[in-house]
Image (cartoon, grey):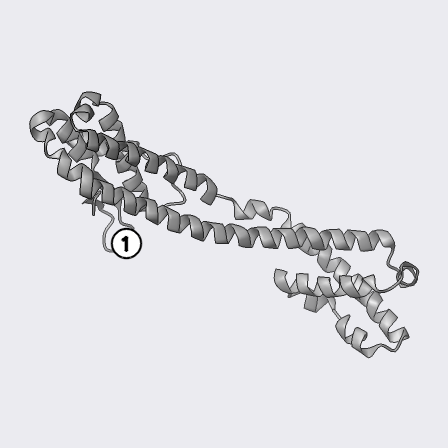
Amino acid sequence: MKEIIIALWYYKPQIHLFMNDYQTARSASIKLIVKEAKSHPEALALIPKFSSGISRLEAISTEIDAIGILQGKDITGIASDKNTLIDLLSNYLVDISGAVCSHAIEKNDKTLQAKATYKQSAVGKMSQAELLTAAGIIQEEAGKISAEELANEGISAEEMAQFSEAYAKLNDTFTGTREAIIDRSGYTQKLADLFAEASAIKKNILDPLSRQYQRKAPEFYQKYKAASTVIYKRNTKESEEAKVEEASK
């Protein structure tokens, strides 16, 4: 019995960082139940409903691993060049807003002048969202000024194009990061639903029917019971001891 229980530690799913320790242990238990069941086809043939429950449990395990791939989306990777874009956009924001402000002063447009006043020190303290908002305003206002007038203020058409491109790219990273966070919360709920279904199948179908195996296939019964044991470490200050529970709980 001990040898089989210890084997749970070596039968962890390949994808587990997206789950907490208890979920990882439960996933390992589900996989081991399926593995032992499929290793005893003659026992499964004795109780068709038990066999169907094992098939669904296997499908759930596959879904859990698939969610791991999706939930493991690397938010840092989505914005791997974010810092470079922030620096680039910040520099352009200061330069182009200065040009727009100078143009506004010349035209005696105090409203535009107020919109276009961004000092380097203030821009450096902006969050990504604030930077995007400010850049969007300047991009719009600069777009109302002719290329010739902007060039007279020192801003070339190429610089405006680069400013617009940096703005678009940084906005994409901001949107992508938010979408990834939203996706993760959805995956977390899906994961909880799958574990709940697995527990229901075990509690309401597999466990009641497995009692027949005490008489019909005792060796498989013992392996099923061992595989059903969830072993995990509770990371608390009070205890670092392994926690053992039945998977149906």
Asked whether 142 or 199 is in front, the reply is 199
Give the amino acid at mark 1: Thr
* Residue at the left extreme, as displayed: 215
Pointer 1 local density, CA inside 10 Å: few below 14, some 14–19, many at least 20:
few
Can you see residue 22?
Answer: no
- Where is 195 relative to 86, above or below? above
| Residue at horizontal 64 percent and vertical 51 percent from the top | 172
Q: Is residue 145 left or right of residue 242?
A: right
Note whether 62 is above or below 160 in the view shown: above
Q: Quadrant of residue 144?
A: bottom right
Closer to us: 31 or 91: 31
**Residue at the top extreme of this rendering:** 42
Residue at image mark 1: 236
Q: Looking at the picture, does residue 240 appear above or below residue 93?
A: above
Residue 42 lies, with reference to residue 104, above or below; the image says above
Residue 177 placed where, x, y %?
56, 52
Q: Position of residue 219 (x, y in %)?
A: 12, 25
Q: Toward which corner of the image does residue 36 lie, by quadrant?
A: top left
Quarter the N terminus occupies: top left
Residue 4 seen anywhere in this rendered image of the structure:
yes
Q: Position of residue 39 (x, y in %)?
A: 24, 23
Dot 1 falls on a residue whose secondary structure is loop
Residue 99, quarter of picture = bottom right
**Residue 139 position in % (x across, y down):** 77, 61
Q: Residue at x 64, y 47 (%)?
A: 81
Say which residue appears at 20% left-offset and 26% top-offset: 44
